[in-house]
Amino acid sequence: DAGITQSPRYKITETGRQVTLMCHQTWSHSYMFWYRQDLGHGLRLIYYSAAADITDKGEVPDGYVVSRSKTENFPLTLESATRSQTSVYFCASRERGNTEAFFGQGTRLTVV
Amino acid sequence: GENVEQHPSTLSVQEGDSAVIKCTYSDSASNYFPWYKQELGKRPQLIIDIRSNVGEKKDQRIAVTLNKTAKHFSLHITETQPEDSAVYFCAVERAGGRQLTFGSGTQLTVLP
């Protein structure tokens, strides 16, 4: 199916563990984004990518790592998870600036 | 960086009444202003957007107005229905920008 998908949908991990959230889009959009959603904070940008092998920090990048070796994939890694990283994570993609962003279904991550 | 403030954070209206949500922004170079709707447990989805060369845009019961001088824009929903209950996010992007900056969201509840 065409679209943008995230996996897993739900994840529980322990403090200090490494965890990777996956994001895959089938539109060949140039831009991809990772946001976290916390109550009262809306959607905060973690990292984004303008093309394969080009990534840049957003508003809240500390504790996260991204890569983009292929246009369609944009994984987000928490190298050593902390409880403050408990959140809902959304991946999004768009073709270029000033256009609609399409969001994945979200991943609910709990760090215990 | 861009600062986007969204008010109110919660809004309750009677079915059939109108709802208005307002956002202010700080970067005068911003020129793209979308609104996203997020139903409970779902992904955010674009409902309407406006660019800085127009002052108002309508789509059936939804309208967005933009005041570039005052740096604010608003979402207007008329004849509200229970299915309008959701969280609404405004967002802002500058010309040629690569990333959207989101407001903190408004929980709209339409009471039957």
Image: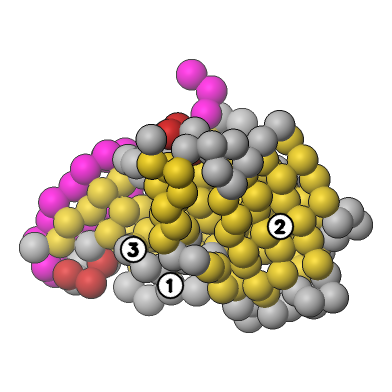
Assess disc 1: are there few (<14), some (14-19) or many (≥20) residues with their C-alpha within 10 Å of its C-alpha. Answer: some
Chain letter of mark 1 equals A
- Does residue B67 lie above or below A71 as drawn? below
Three-letter code for the amino acid on which mark 2 is drawn: Phe
Callouts 1 and 2 in the same chain? no
Residue B46, image x and y in percent? 60, 42
The structure residue drawn at horizontal position 32% and vertical position 63%, both measured from the top left corner, is A39
Chain of residue at mark 2: B
Identify the magenta region.
A1-22
- Badge 1 amino acid: Pro
In percent of width and height, residue B61 lies at: 66, 36
Q: Compared to B3, does A69 lie above or below?
A: above
In the rendered image, residue B38 lying in the magenta stretch gets the answer no
Residue of label 1? A61
**Left or right: A34 as drawn, with respect to A85:** right
Which subunit holds the residue at mark 3? A
Disc 2 element = strand
Q: Residues within 10 Å of mark 3 (few under 14, many from 20)?
A: some
Which residue is more in the foreground, B76 or A106? B76
- In front here: B56 or A61? B56
Is residue A12 a member of the stretch shown in magenta? yes
Can the viewer see residue B110 in this picture?
yes
Residue on which the image places disc 2: B33
